Image (cartoon, grey):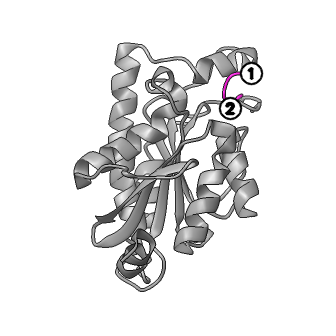
Amino acid sequence: MGVSSLLDKLFPSGNGGGSEGPPWIVVGLGNPGAEYKNTRHNVGWWCIDELIKRTNVELNRKRKEVRYAEVELGGTQVILAYPRTFMNKSGLALSYLTNRFKTTPENILVVTDDINLKPGSVRIRKKGGPGGHNGLKSIITALGTNEFPRVRIGVGNPDSSDEQVSHVLGTFDPDTRDLVRSAATRAADAITMIVNGEIDNAMNQYNAQADKKPNKKKNDDGASKPN
């Protein structure tokens, strides 16, 4: 039996909460390469790392645009994934995965950094625009809709909008890093709730804790490979 046939047997239906349908897709956004591993822009990967650790798997299925693994979270079938492209091409990973697993946007969960949230905060939305985030922008274009849930992890805003690229591609000081790693762990808890049909409960629990910073102009964050 080929790999594709085996996967079809493993995932004939099964969308979450134990009902039949395609699996959930949970994708953490970030840039590939060791030099980006600890940057603010890669906190979405930190959350996927936490889920990988909990489920004792590796992202051992590889395509040129994505690495992924099949797991269960609370009894729900889930695809955990990292894009293998730079941030502004993140939609390529979702194009492949949605075609492969026939998952619809409402069962796609994107985990991303957010410069407009206080470091260490977690906020969940059922849908929305990109908010200046090039990874989300690419995914919205690829899916043809912005109606998919996302979990945003706060990384803080630079003092000047001119510094946004260097900010998101920079690293945290030790104290802030610990705050954000803790947030990635809480985000993993929230994801388990969401894929098991508890998105409203997750929003009530985690959004109440998120202390959003005062409004600032949102510019594109230069989320691709540095030009």
Indicate the quadrant containing the C terminus: top left, top right, bottom left or bottom right.
top right
Image location of residue 16, percent across then percent down: 40, 75
Q: Name the residue rendered at 34%, 81% in the picture.
A: 18
Q: Which residue corresponds to the image point at 37% horizontal and 75% vertical from the top-left?
A: 6
Say which quarter of the image contains residue 77.
Answer: bottom left
Reply above or below: 172 against 194: above
Please say if 213 is above or below 190: above
Please indicate, yes or no, whether residue 202 appears anywhere in the rendered image: yes
Q: Position of residue 195 (x, y in %)?
A: 41, 67
Q: Which residue is mark 1?
A: 227
- Crowdedness near tag 2: few (<14), some (14–19) or many (≥20) residues, C-alpha within 10 Å: some
Q: Compute the Cα span from label 1 to label 2.
A: 8 Å
Q: Secondary structure at mark 1?
A: loop
Residue at horizontal 72 percent and vertical 57 percent from the top: 142
| CB under 8 Å between discs 1 and 2 | yes
Amino acid carrying label 2: it is Ser
Circle number at residue 224:
2
Task: Please state, as top left, top right, bottom left or bottom right, where the N terminus lies in the image.
Answer: bottom left
On residue 191, the disc is none
Judging depth in this view, the residue of 33 and 123 nearest the camera is 33
Q: Position of residue 53 (x, y in %)?
A: 25, 46
| Residue 44 counted in the magenta span | no
Give the residue at x 42% y 62%.
Answer: 79
Does the rendering let one see residue 155?
no
Q: Residues within 10 Å of mark 1 (few under 14, many from 20)?
A: few
| Magenta-highlighted residues | 222-227
Please name whichever residue, 170 or 162, is drawn nearer the observer in this view of the structure.
Answer: 170
SS for dot 2:
loop
